[in-house]
Image (cartoon, coloured by chain):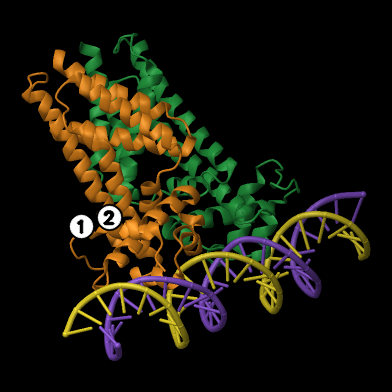
Chain colours: A orange, B green, C purple, D yellow
DNA sequence: CCAGGAGTGGACTTGCTGGTCCATTTTTCG
DNA sequence: CGAAAAATGGACCAGCAAGTCCACTCCTGG
């Protein structure tokens, strides 16, 4: 029985070239649609319940799947599913940052990025799926660390590009170390978000980012 | 049967005035010793296994106690125990920072604090009991958030005092907002530690703190 | 059209873990 | 001393959630 919703997902997936599941089995269009639905549904469940409370039955209920499907697409079980969700969430983070990170060659652009970032996490509140996920399967699953490392690396690289864009535009001396600035910016974000998660207040994130941009700008005038 | 170790703990606790357990029951010296042993042992277990994997039986084995004792001293069960551990760990953090935070009136003192902080977390590696704890019982238990908020507040206040000490010593203009600087410093630490937890690398923590102190110092000369 | 494989459903098993309960020992204190 | 309270030991219970298994349906390709 295929309802309209599933059919739509199949159509949406049709363009994608043939993929393979983690176990190497070929997936049909329907299979890919189901797999994607599971990952997205699991991500929703995790955002709402947290990693601890979220159960496979919750995911089943949310995605209208059965347990056999979960283990069909993620043979290694819960950890493998969580890893897939981590990758999905990492993509979402970059997806949100990308339009702002693209052209950081003016101070106004930096301020837009800063405000957008604060606003995003303010809306998100104390839910940080990727944070909890990486902490959950942190030292146990080696793949989880790889996902987070990849995200941080890309994020930092984009920030460093932004700093260099300022330098290329003549708005910042070439003596500034773009990579170190980007690393510190990343730490400021992570710290602000971490405190937001722990306390529920965006204050630290806002102050840290404002100050980071201000300090960067101060380097231009000295 | 009381062995020498327990007796020593009783002696150590003897000086403390009569306390009460969370449920309001009076505790004898032996009771206080046992309770303290449970908290410390649980903290060790949590550091090694993480919140997820750690079980009450692990704590029992580590502390040579029975299940009835755990529920005798922490009637609300695991959450109450974890909360006690969180408080214990928070004290340890401040205890470590205190000697450095005490007299931040010279740039050398700030550098000592910075290096000591980096070194401490470098040794600790990817284990951050308080971080995982606060994330674990974060939004569920209201008390957990209070513990973390209290720690952050004290930490930030001490940093702000340090900034003001620089100002009082004439090494920093009075126009600098001590509280905002302290908030950003705290975010830098948290972010660096967070990235350390996720990636296993201290690089970001080191860079963030070095840059934070350098940026602060730069405010003195401009 | 039909055979084999992909996809699906859901009952069942299994292991663990938090939590309960009561018996027993030890300490306290009048 | 002796009774009451505190401390301790450990068997037992209950529920939950991950993972297994087999039967069944649907799709696809020759």
Q: Residue at x 40, y 68 (%)?
A: A70
Question: Where is residue B59 drawn, in percent x and y?
Answer: 54, 62
The residue tagged 1 is A15
User: What is the quadrant of the N terminus of chain A in the image?
Assistant: bottom left
Disc 2, SS? helix
Say whether marks 1 and 2 touch (CB < 8 Å).
yes
Apparent side of residue A189 relative to residue A177 in the rendered image (left or right): right
Q: Kindly identify which chain the residue marked by label 1 belongs to.
A: A
Q: Residue at x 59, y 52 (%)?
A: B79
Q: Between residues A113 and B208, which one lies in front from this camera angle?
A: A113
Question: Where is residue B222 drawn, in percent x and y?
Answer: 20, 10
Q: Between residues B66 and A4, which one lies in front from this camera angle?
A: A4
Q: Residue at x 38, y 34 (%)?
A: A121
Question: Residue A12 bears which disc, if any?
Answer: 2
Q: Kindly identify which chain the residue marked by label 2 belongs to.
A: A
Question: Where is residue B55 drawn, in percent x and y?
Answer: 53, 63
Q: Is residue B127 visible?
A: yes
Disc 1, SS? loop
Quadrant assignment, res A72: bottom left
User: What is the quadrant of the C terminus of chain A in the image?
Assistant: top left
């Amino acid at each position: 029985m295929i309802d309209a919703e599933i059919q739509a997902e199949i159509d949406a997936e049709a363009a994608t070239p043939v993929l393979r599941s983690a176990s190497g089995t070929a997936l049909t269009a329907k299979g890919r649609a189901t797999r994607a639905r599971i990952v997205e549904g699991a991500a929703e469940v995790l955002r709402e319940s947290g990693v601890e409370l979220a159960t496979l039955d919750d995911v089943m209920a949310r995605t209208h799947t059965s347990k056999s499907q979960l283990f069909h697409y993620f043979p290694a079980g819960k950890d493998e599913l969580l890893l897939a969700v981590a990758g999905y969430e990492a993509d979402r983070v970059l997806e949100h940052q990308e339009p702002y990170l693209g052209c950081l060659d003016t101070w106004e652009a930096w301020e837009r990025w800063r405000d957008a970032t604060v606003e995003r996490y303010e809306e998100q509140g104390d839910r940080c799926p990727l944070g909890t996920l990486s902490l959950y399967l942190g030292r146990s699953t080696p793949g989880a660390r790889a996902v987070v490392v990849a995200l941080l690396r890309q994020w930092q690289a984009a920030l460093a590009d932004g700093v260099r864009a300022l330098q290329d535009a003549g708005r910042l001396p070439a003596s500034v170390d773009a990579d170190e600035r980007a690393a510190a910016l990343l730490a400021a974000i992570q710290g602000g978000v971490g405190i937001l998660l722990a306390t529920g207040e965006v204050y630290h994130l806002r102050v840290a980012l404002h100050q980071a941009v201000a300090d960067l700008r101060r380097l231009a005038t000295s």
